[in-house]
Image (tube, rainbow, N blue to C red):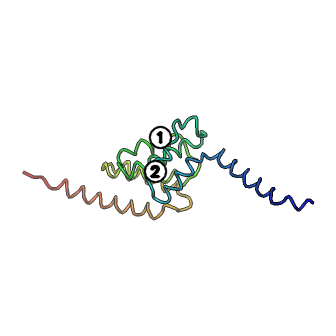
Amino acid sequence: MFFSYWGWGVLVLLLSIIVFVTFFFNEKMLIAQYYLRKENMEASETWLKKIKNYESELLKAQHGYYHLLIGLIESRKAPLQSEKYFKKSLALGMTMDHNIALAKLSLAGIAMAKRNKREATMYLQEAKKADKNKLLAEQIKMMQGQMGQLDKQQVQTRGFRPR
C-alpha cells in the first residue's frame, strides 16, 4: 500500500521545486537569461520588458542582475549607452564574482571606446581581481592587448598635425 503512492510523491516534489524556483528566481529573468545565452537578444529583451516595475517584482538581490542583463542587451545595440546600466548593476550589488567581473570588463571596454585609458585600466584591474575562477581571463588578456594598441594609435594621431 505504501509503495503505490511513490508516483504522486515524485510529482508533488517536482511541482514544489518549480514553485520554489519561480518564487525565489523570477521566471521572466530566467527565460531572459536563457535567450541571452542562446544569443537571441530580441526574445531576451521582450522577456525583460515584461517586468514592468523591477523594484516590486524582483527580490532586492536581483536588481543588480536585472540591470546587468539590460546592459548586456543594450551593449549590442549602442555600447556607449549601456554604461549607465553596468554602473547601476554594480551600485545595486551582485553576489557572484564573475558577474561583477563581467560588468567591470564591459565598463573597461566602454572606457576604451571613449579613449579614457586610466579608467579602462582601473576597470580591467578590478575585473581581474573579481574573476577568481578565471572565467574571463582570456577576454581580459585580449582587452589588455587592445589597450596596448590604443597607446600606439594615440601616439600616431598626436604626432600628425594636418595643415
- Relative to 16, say whether 134 is above or below: below
Residue 96 to residue 139: above or below: above
In the drawing, does residue 131 fall left or right of residue 42? right
For residue 7, which numbered disc appears in the image? none
Please report whichever mark, 1 or 2, sits nearer to the chain's N-terminal start. 1
Observer-nearest of 12 and 26: 12
Q: Quadrant of residue 157?
A: bottom left
* Most distant residue in the right direction: 1
Q: Position of residue 54 (x, y in %)?
A: 54, 38
Distance Cα–Cα, label 1 vs label 2: 11 Å
Callout 2 amino acid: Lys
Secondary structure beneath disc 2? helix
At label 1, the amino acid type is: Lys
Residue density around tag 1, few if under 14, some if 14–19, many if 20 or more, within 10 Å: some
Q: Quadrant of residue 87?
A: top left
The residue located at (36%, 63%) in the rendering is 145
Residue at 17 percent of width and 56 percent of height: 159
Q: On residue 104, which mark appears?
A: 2
Graded by Cα atoms within 10 Å as few (under 14), some (14 to 19) or many (20 or more), the crowding at tag 2 reads: many
- Residue at x 45%, y 65% (from the top left corner): 138
Residue in the image at 53% along x and 53% along y: 33
Looking at the image, residue 159 sits to the left or right of residue 81; the answer is left
Residue 3 rendering spot, x and y as whole percentages? 89, 62
Q: Residue 89 versus residue 24: which sits nearer the camera?
A: 24
Percent x, y of residue 114? 31, 48
**On-image quarter of the N terminus:** bottom right
Q: Which residue is mark 1?
A: 88
